[in-house]
Amino acid sequence: MDTLGFDIGGTDVKAGRMGPNGEVREETRFSTPVDQPPEELVSQIANAVRKLGSSLPVGVACAGIIRARDGFVAASPNLPQLRGFPLRSALEQELSRAVAVLNDANAFVLAEVRTGAGRGFHDVIGLTIGTGVGGGIVLQGKLHTGRSGYGGELGHVILDASGRLCACGNRGCLEALVCRAAILEEYAAQGGRNAADPETVAHRAAAGESAAIRTWDAIGARLGLGLGSLANIFDPELFIVGGGISKANELLLKPARVTLEDAALAPTDQLPEVRVAELSNAAGWIGAAAQAREIE
């Protein structure tokens, strides 16, 4: 059976219809009603469901801290109107059926496992690196979100208690050490000239600039330390790295693998692979559509 997926972002809601083998049959998007009450968002999703396939199972991914067991939005920095909103129950009431609701980073890793870089793997950890760091855990082929459904916030694993201040209020979180702002800060500390974004730093590193190369070596090592810690806890088969920062590709992942090997306790020949994500901006709605298959 086909399923429908929605990915609620701060600017747009991406949506699509996915076939039983993961094939994308249709994609669409509409503007997120950011200045409206959350009920308006629910209404617009319901309208899109009717156009895409009114009788099909529905999954919805949303940026923020989502309680997986009941789809309650505890917090959503880019969608403040959804804070404290029972998103799943509101959607279920509007659509008169069960709806899967999950965090967008969880949707990302589930999508990659089902149809992207993680095809064929069953124990996978995904990280999306950009302004912040999101994470998701798939164990034995299913999302793992913990007892209450708040698990998987991997960007807030603390690596250095006296380190850079994180947006969550703690210091030295993985997010604080490898995010967009941290890259630009590290580049300046390495003596790099003005750069507006990490893409510029990546281009300069690819061109051989030493300050840029040292920057990615430092950021990659920090990422590898986080991966090593996660490897020691979960022993996954694979790490998938996505988000805008993953476009640096081997500039980031090569030093990360070196540090992962040093930090992980497993023998070198049993370390998890580290791959770049494949699905780009479609991962959120695809993962939501995949999760819709799990509705009982």
Image (cartoon, grey):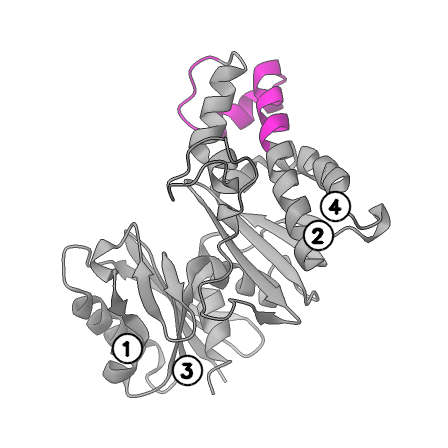
| Picture residue at 32% right of the left edge, 75% below the top | 88
N-terminal label among 1 and 4: 1
Of badges 3 and 2, the one in the foreground is 2
Of badges 1 and 3, the one in the foreground is 1
The answer to whether marks 3 and 2 mark residues whose Cβ atoms lie closer than 8 Å is no
Instruction: Compute the Cα span from label 2 to label 1.
Output: 38 Å
Q: Amino acid at mark 2?
A: Asn
Q: Amino acid at mark 4?
A: Ala
Q: Secondary structure at mark 3?
A: loop
What residue does disc 1 label? 91
N-terminal label among 2 and 4: 2
Of badges 1 and 4, the one in the foreground is 4
Residue 44 covered by magenta stretch? no
Q: Secondary structure at mark 4?
A: loop
Percent x, y for residue 34? 19, 55
In the image: residue 161, left or right of residue 94: right
What residue does disc 4 label? 264
- Above or below: residue 43 compared with residue 257: below
